Image (spheres, helix red, strand yellow):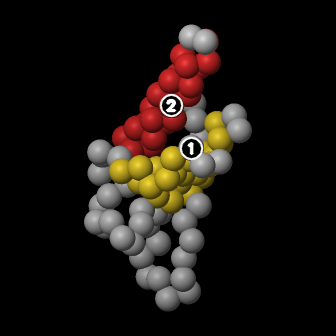
């Protein structure tokens, strides 16, 4: 099971402390499911470091489903790379 950590950052004046960023490490990757001020308030995004993808819009408005979608996105990218490498 993948463990996620609340990595939200807050201003001292923030009253609402609802988590807005979740981070996990999978191998060498750091995967973050987060909100962003330039998107709708209920839109979850995924960013994967180092520079795999940034602010990828996730379909789910539910954070747990969004986390699963982010992991699936990373898995698809890894599978595509493996397929490309092994087909040469």
- Residue at horizontal 56%, vertical 57%? 6
Q: Earlier in the sequence, mark 2 or mark 1?
A: 1
Residue with the most extreme right position: 28
Locate residue 46 relative to residue 61 in the image: left or right: right
- Residue at horizontal 42%, vertical 76%? 16
The quadrant of the rendering that contains the C terminus is: top right
Q: Which residue is mark 1?
A: 52
Residue 52 pos. (x, y %): 56, 44
Q: Nearer the viewer, residue 20 or 18?
A: 20
Q: What is the quadrant of residue 73 in the picture?
A: top left
Residue 18 pos. (x, y %): 43, 67
CA gap between label 2 and label 1 equals: 8 Å
Locate residue 35 relative to residue 60 in the image: left or right: right
Q: Which secondary structure, mark 1?
A: loop
Residue 1 pos. (x, y %): 57, 30
Is any part of residue 1 visible from this angle?
yes
Q: Nearer the viewer, residue 43 or 79?
A: 79
Q: Which secondary structure, mark 2?
A: helix
Q: Which mark is residue 77?
A: 2
Above or below, 55 relative to 15: above
């Amino acid at each position: 099971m993948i463990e996620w950590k609340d990595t939200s950052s807050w201003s001292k004046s923030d009253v609402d402390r609802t988590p807005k960023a979740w981070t996990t490490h999978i191998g060498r990757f750091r995967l973050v499911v987060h909100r962003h001020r330039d998107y709708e308030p209920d839109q979850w995004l995924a960013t994967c470091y180092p520079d795999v993808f940034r602010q990828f819009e996730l379909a789910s408005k539910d954070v747990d489903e969004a986390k699963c979608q982010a992991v699936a996105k990373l898995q698809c990218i890894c599978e595509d790379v493996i397929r490309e490498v092994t087909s040469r």
